[in-house]
Amino acid sequence: MNLRGAVIQNLNGQNPNELSAVIQDAISKGEEKTLPGLGVMLELFWKKSTAEEQKVVLERMASALQ
């Protein structure tokens, strides 16, 4: 199985609180190995987002990088 498929399989069915815990854990540990999983989560979010939601995310990302 590819990495994308493994991440999706591992996260499938989790509720918002569980997903939040996964994200917070990945951020707090700061391990490079968690970055691909966060990237897959962003990809899935992005594909389901409206253009306006994407714009808001991009603006927040740009602001965070300054």
Image (tube, rainbow, N blue to C red):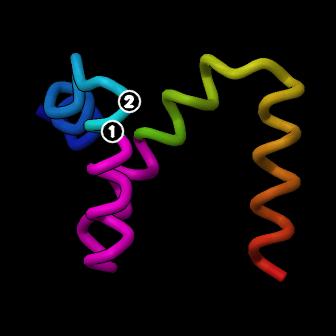
**Residue 19 got which mark?**
1
Label 2 crowding class (10 Å Cα cut-off): few <14, some 14-19, many 20+?
A: few
Q: Which residues are magenta?
A: 20-40
Left or right? Give the position of 39 relative to 62: left
Residue drawn at (45%, 50%), measured in percent from left and top? Answer: 39
Residue drawn at (37%, 45%), measured in percent from left and top? Answer: 20
Q: Main secondary structure of the magenta part?
A: helix
Question: What is the C-alpha distance between the residues marked 2 and 1?
Answer: 5 Å
44 falls in the magenta region: no
Picture quadrant where residue 36 is located: bottom left
15 and 29: which one is in front? 15
* Residue 11, horizontal then vertical, whole percent: 23, 31
Quadrant for the N terminus, please.
top left
| Amino acid carrying mark 1 in the image | Leu
Q: 40 above or below 16?
A: below
* Residue 46, horizontal then vertical, whole percent: 63, 31
25 and 52: which one is in front? 25
Picture quadrant where residue 8 is located: top left
Residue drawn at (24%, 69%), measured in percent from left and top? Answer: 33
* Residue 23, horizontal then vertical, whole percent: 36, 54
Picture quadrant where residue 4 is located: top left
**Residue 28 got which mark?**
none
Query: Pointers 2 and 1 in contact (CB under 8 A)?
Result: yes
* Residue 66, horizontal then vertical, whole percent: 84, 82
Q: 13 above or below 32?
A: above
Q: Please say whether residue 1 is visible from this viewpoint.
A: yes
Q: Which residue is mark 2?
A: 16
Q: Please say whether residue 31 is visible from this viewpoint.
A: no
